[in-house]
Image: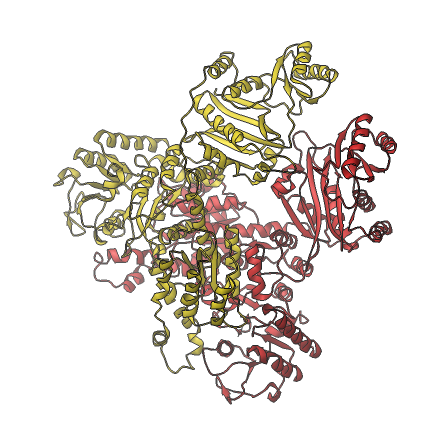
Chain colours: A red, B yellow
Amino acid sequence: MPDNPLHLLLHPRSVATAGAGNNPMKMGTLQALSLIKDGYQGKFYPIHPTDKIVLGHRAYASPLDLPESPDLALIVVPTDQVIPVLEDFAKIGTKRAIIISAGFRETGDAGRKQEERLKEIAAASGMRFLGPNCMGVINTGTALNVTLGELPKRPGALGFASQSGTYVAQTLPYLKERGIRFSKAVSCGNEADIDMIDVLEYLGEDEQTKAIILYIEGLRDGRRFIEAARRITPHKPVLAQYVGGSASGAQSGQSHTGALTGPDLLYEGIFRQAGIIRCHSIEDLYAHGWVHATQPPLRGKRLAVVTNSGGPGTAISDTADRGGMTVPRFSDALQAKIRPLIPPHAAGANPVDLTFHLDTQVLALTIPEFIMESSEVDGLILHGAVNSGFLQMVYPHIRGLIGDVSREAFLETMAKDMDAAVGFHRKYDLPLVVSSFFGRQDNFTSLYMDNDISVFDSPEKAARGMASLLRHLEIRRRKPIVTPALPPASPAATGIIRAALAAGQRALDEHQAKELLAVYGVPVTREEIARIEEEAVKIANGIGFPVAVKACAWEIMHKSGLGLIALNIRTEEALREAFRSVREAAGKATPVLIQQMVAGGREFVAGMTRFPGFGPCVLFGLGGVFTEALQDTCMRSAPLSAVEAEEMLTDIRAKALLGEFRGLPAVDALTLAGILQAVGAIALLHPEIAEIDLNPIIIAGSKPVVADALFVLRA
Amino acid sequence: MPDNPLHLLLHPRSVATAGAGNNPMKMGTLQALSLIKDGYQGKFYPIHPTDKIVLGHRAYASPLDLPESPDLALIVVPTDQVIPVLEDFAKIGTKRAIIISAGFRETGDAGRKQEERLKEIAAASGMRFLGPNCMGVINTGTALNVTLGELPKRPGALGFASQSGTYVAQTLPYLKERGIRFSKAVSCGNEADIDMIDVLEYLGEDEQTKAIILYIEGLRDGRRFIEAARRITPHKPVLAQYVGGSASGAQSGQSHTGALTGPDLLYEGIFRQAGIIRCHSIEDLYAHGWVHATQPPLRGKRLAVVTNSGGPGTAISDTADRGGMTVPRFSDALQAKIRPLIPPHAAGANPVDLTFHLDTQVLALTIPEFIMESSEVDGLILHGAVNSGFLQMVYPHIRGLIGDVSREAFLETMAKDMDAAVGFHRKYDLPLVVSSFFGRQDNFTSLYMDNDISVFDSPEKAARGMASLLRHLEIRRRKPIVTPALPPASPAATGIIRAALAAGQRALDEHQAKELLAVYGVPVTREEIARIEEEAVKIANGIGFPVAVKACAWEIMHKSGLGLIALNIRTEEALREAFRSVREAAGKATPVLIQQMVAGGREFVAGMTRFPGFGPCVLFGLGGVFTEALQDTCMRSAPLSAVEAEEMLTDIRAKALLGEFRGLPAVDALTLAGILQAVGAIALLHPEIAEIDLNPIIIAGSKPVVADALFVLRA
């Protein structure tokens, strides 16, 4: 994808730096050192106002003095020098820049204006840039490193786009310790020009990248994000952490990168819509991403657990079960192969618990291979393969017993060669995840880590890492999503809205709202407006008793508890009484809606809110009186395909209400999903509508009917 | 508490081992080595069949040959030798034993019998023992170590009772790496005699122990556990992990220690009842326990966050917010003190983000101290204090620039003395928790760890560790729990049950159930049994329309959807029709219940189930049609104090329904809680009752009324 701006940015033939000098403890210098020391093969041009030689390379006083136009400019100068430097690079035709310097949009209005100026300069010259306020990029494929630390020797397979620079630049030792290696990593900064979606799209097509992780504080173009991600997620796992969903997270993110945050419900929804696996910590993001990047995909949910200790085996089983996996009992045939290899009191049915056992050959290879070749499971977690770590643990106590052997000599004697333990699972194309309380000081831990097998430092974490693979199986099995074409805007609907606006309404009245819904095929209650009592009687007889009686005016957005609504009116006499009493409560000759009473034990809500950066978003949840008390809702960005609308239905805790339920038939899910699609379409077709609230949608038998509706118009 | 069996077991003046020899790679030898090498000051007597000297100590062929009766016997022999060895120790009057050997109850019936024999031997001689199938104990107070690894030099403050031996014996290097140190740790094994509750009670009174952690696969005496824990939890934090709640966890635990598991809902409930903080991983159990053991308690929920990077600051804020904390904006006065110390574009209002900054003095001391002395927060999380770790990270790149300086010399020059950074927070008596991506290779990380300040390796974990302290603030603020005295069993209730059993009933019919409830003061619907139509009419007129009409016989446990119930009968005509139709559906002249119709928008459920080891447990939740669909329930062990019953009411997600709600008054919580207490009391007073299900309890206005009731009797 040479048209993606990241392509040239990550594969420059030449890089010029402004802000690198010979003081090793300055950011710019450290980044330039990473560039020239880690194997990057292109040309390097330092720009320096006074020094003639910088880091052993000839320096130039200004970009204008350079012998050629570099592919990439790296700008790490004080804030007030960024604009002139960028102008100079623009003048000489440099097409890509990384602006590390901070002090722009994240600081307020003045900074925002400066950032606009950067965009103008770049746009005018056809330059694309990353930042400002970022920490650089890594491309291990070409040994391009513009961060603070040293790259690992071998390239990795995990692609990363981050709205925090720290997670790209300062965690390299943390990642090295755990054997996790990037393919490409990009600190996105303020995203004045190149944004996280560009990076995501690039990583989606990058062959070196086997899984993608995203650290997100806020998205400015949610819809483009969804579309981009879901082209990738069916074939390449994408995991994301979002931290802007709480009040404190939003406040902090704002001052960090000026991020545009949204409620957690919204991001939870768009991640599902896009097929993205959500993580709730940076640790999980890195670690689960690495499992996805290195292990074959899970093809089912059956897990084998092999351990040398009961506690971790139980903890792995319990956690995996919560993650949707099963720990099936092995067949008698498989148990018969395992039994002779383990102590008589040990468990062999799954989990296999060898109990305290120093024969790592059996634990780490023989038994796991028996299990994998049985085809009885889809993946395996191993806990307790430990050798030199254990020996170091006991060495202080036993050294007197074994003669005057040094720790090193002792480890040398005992350490076992177990290369086979890291290769066998590839034969069966099944994922293997390891748990150990011993870090790199143990030769097994190091061996696994150095051979792209994740080692988690506690059993529950290993189980959660494996269960993350199950999430991608579910995503691969999703029905294909095709963004639907919108129906044409209905002139009748436009007419209703225009008339309301012309009349000075700030909302539609209930009857107008229902008429508009009906135009788009949404099933609504039968109802008519009565202006006098006799008319009410005539309408009610036409609809058939029982009926509901409601004051109907746009100003009345909430009717309960004010005497403006009477339900279950069964006789003409009661109707007349209700008509008069509703009128009285309204205090004037308000039109009165005579409405079919819909009976049904199940009530849902559908709604629409617009979020900056996302456009209209559709809400679905448990409705009626429980809406607020239970807050059992989910959200998606519109437009909604049929598949996405159906997925919303099962995204609430109360999803059991949709099936056959206490003698009631299953809900007509197609119609209910259709209502959600229609809500999204109406919002897209009619931008005058600010909010929609359909509550309750009553399920009459199996059929959803909208019994009340509120449309708020834009001021 | 010298009467607690752990006292002598953890403070023996002499220990004899059976199973230790001179082969250093045997379990018994390793444990004996831990005993004699880590500083234990008592006498040590090895028992060995042939060797005369074991580990440098004179060995004895049998316990019977010992010169004195040792306080403690450590038994690590093959399974079939355990009984004779224990008999010998019993003969010489040894009062405490630890049986490490496995192969007992966890292996099935034969093993179960052998375990019973151990108990008989011990009981006959007044001996108390730990195990079998355990991994030993640690008492750092007396340097008593009967595990596999080396104790840390300094005693710790974290007490541990574990149903997994690994977590006591094989995680010592893991804990050392993280600076976590036990006071006492006990592997409970099969708990044939001494059980986890004995250990809990011991740790509760142990002055060295400042916080207690429990790893639980199943409890055999739930009630005793609750009573013991809640004597401790108001003044000393107790944290627990339970892993038996899922199908896979239960299956695995069973084969591990033969644990008696129960549903997750039950354990969740009894932990709340006991004031125990639940953890969901061994990592959290250790790490959060250590925060509780070392930090002053939180006195409020206001958190300060100080970092050198925006991403971690946002992640900490977001996670702490989810944990119930706030990250309040600092006062202008406090910001004015911070501002001059940070770059102009950096955030100073909370989180304080110094951005890339190498002046650790400001980050780790000056600013945190300004914040703590301001009294504007209750605790502080620091991220980014790093020195030698960062230097090591950049060293490979800068070594050319700084002359031919070795890594060690470079670190020596740059490393800063920051002892003040680990002491200041004690002055303010406020908790400090640290987050760093750098492990012990960094001098700051080591310094914090070595001074009892927790360092978490990711920002979210630090936030969760701090939020765990907030859980204990909530527990300290609980109203005192007084286990209530049961009312006397009512002869009328006993009569109802006896009559039903005598008639061969396996359940009470609805009317009998209501009569029994009414005897104990539970509000029920007004109702009477009609045997003929005319009687029905008379009863209905007495109660007042509308009424409900229900077939009433003990065999009919579920009435919906079978034509056995008619609701909202408003006229005499409709009543006659309903009477006939219910009779017809029942297929015989079943008694018919004519019942007051209770109207109310809110319905709850109360129930009772008996669990082995727990006795009757009371359930509360959202009732009516939503009971199964939403599964919004909680559970407690009976008897329930008024405080515990009230706590149940707010333990469901739908708790908002209990307050003022959509024009309805707040629920009479006292009466509703009283129903839960009564359900527990009834179950305790009448063991013939197997199960109770009161569903729905309808809230009429503010008053709860039981509208349907099922009592299942024991077969």
Q: Is residue B76 left or right of residue B211?
A: left
Look at the picture and state if A473 lies above or below B4: below
Residue A290 in view (yes/no): no
Horizontally, is A381 left or right of B659 in the view? left
Give the camera-side residue of B98 and A559: A559
Which picture quadrant has residue A576? top right
Count the numbered circles shown. Answer: 0
> Compared with residue B504, is residue B706 higher up or lower down, i.e. above or below?
below
x, y percentage for residue B521? 51, 22
Decide: is B491 above or below A344.
above
Image quarter where the C terminus of chain A lies is bottom right
Q: Residue A210, position in %: x, y?
A: 57, 61
Position in image of residue B712 (x %, y %): 52, 22
Q: Residue furthest left?
A: B67
For the N terminus of chain A, which image quadrant? bottom right
State whether residue B122 is above or below residue A392: above
Q: Quick one: B226 or B39, which is closer to the camera?
A: B226
Left or right: A587 in relation to A52: right
The answer, for residue A232, to whether it is visible in the render is yes
* Residue ID at (58%, 61%): A217
Residue A205 lies, in percent from the top left, at: 63, 65
